[in-house]
């Protein structure tokens, strides 16, 4: 399937629907006032087979709860090691929900 990076966030849900990736890594802190939670909700609604992992530098219990309730399969803080991030991706692909906050 390969890796894809989306620069135009307004088109992210449509691209996820088009390419149907196994996992989407979604940074919650997007530039330009883009609401990542809205993008998450659209991706979950339109492409439920693509599992979203939320990625942030500012993890809080409230944010974890909100994103997981919105349909994210995982929540990973930017302080997490690359090995733990890769492990989280593998676990989400295999059907486990993951919260990895450092």
Image: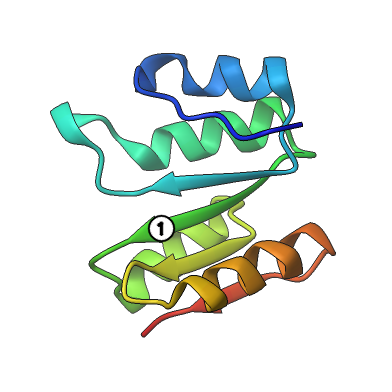
* Rendering colour mode: rainbow
Residue pictured at 77% horizontal, 71% vertical = 96
Percent x, y of residue 39: 45, 32
Q: Which structural element holds mark 1?
A: strand
Above or below, 82 against 72 in this view is below
**Rendered image quadrant of residue 83:** bottom right
Residue extending furthest toward the bottom: 102
Q: Pointer 1: what residue?
A: 55
Percent x, y of residue 1: 76, 31
Residue 9 in the figure: left or right of residue 32: right
Residue pictured at 45% horizontal, 14% vertical = 11
Percent x, y of residue 80: 40, 77
Residue pictured at 62% horizontal, 25% vertical = 16
**Rendered image quadrant of residue 26:** top left
Which quarter of the figure is the C terminus placed in?
Answer: bottom left
Residue 16 in the figure: left or right of residue 37: right
Comparing 86 with 97, the one in front is 86
- Disc 1 residue crowd, few under 14, some 14–19, many 20+, Cα 10 Å: many
**Rendered image quadrant of residue 68:** bottom right
Above or below, 27 against 83 in this view is above
Q: How many marks?
A: 1
Percent x, y of residue 73: 64, 59
Comparing 6 with 72, the one in front is 6
Residue 49 in the figure: left or right of residue 31: right
Residue extending furthest toward the left: 32
Residue pictured at 71% horizontal, 21% vertical = 19
Above or below, 60 against 49 in this view is below
């Amino acid at each position: 399937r390969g890796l894809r990076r989306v620069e135009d966030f307004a088109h992210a849900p449509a691209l996820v629907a088009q390419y149907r990736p196994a996992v989407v890594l979604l940074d919650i802190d997007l530039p330009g006032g883009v609401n990542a939670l809205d993008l998450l909700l659209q991706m979950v609604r339109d492409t439920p087979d693509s599992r979203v992992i939320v990625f942030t530098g500012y993890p809080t219990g409230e944010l974890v709860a909100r994103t997981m309730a919105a349909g994210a399969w995982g929540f990973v803080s930017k302080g997490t090691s690359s090995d733990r991030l890769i492990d989280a991706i593998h676990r989400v692909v295999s059907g486990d929900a993951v919260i990895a906050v450092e």
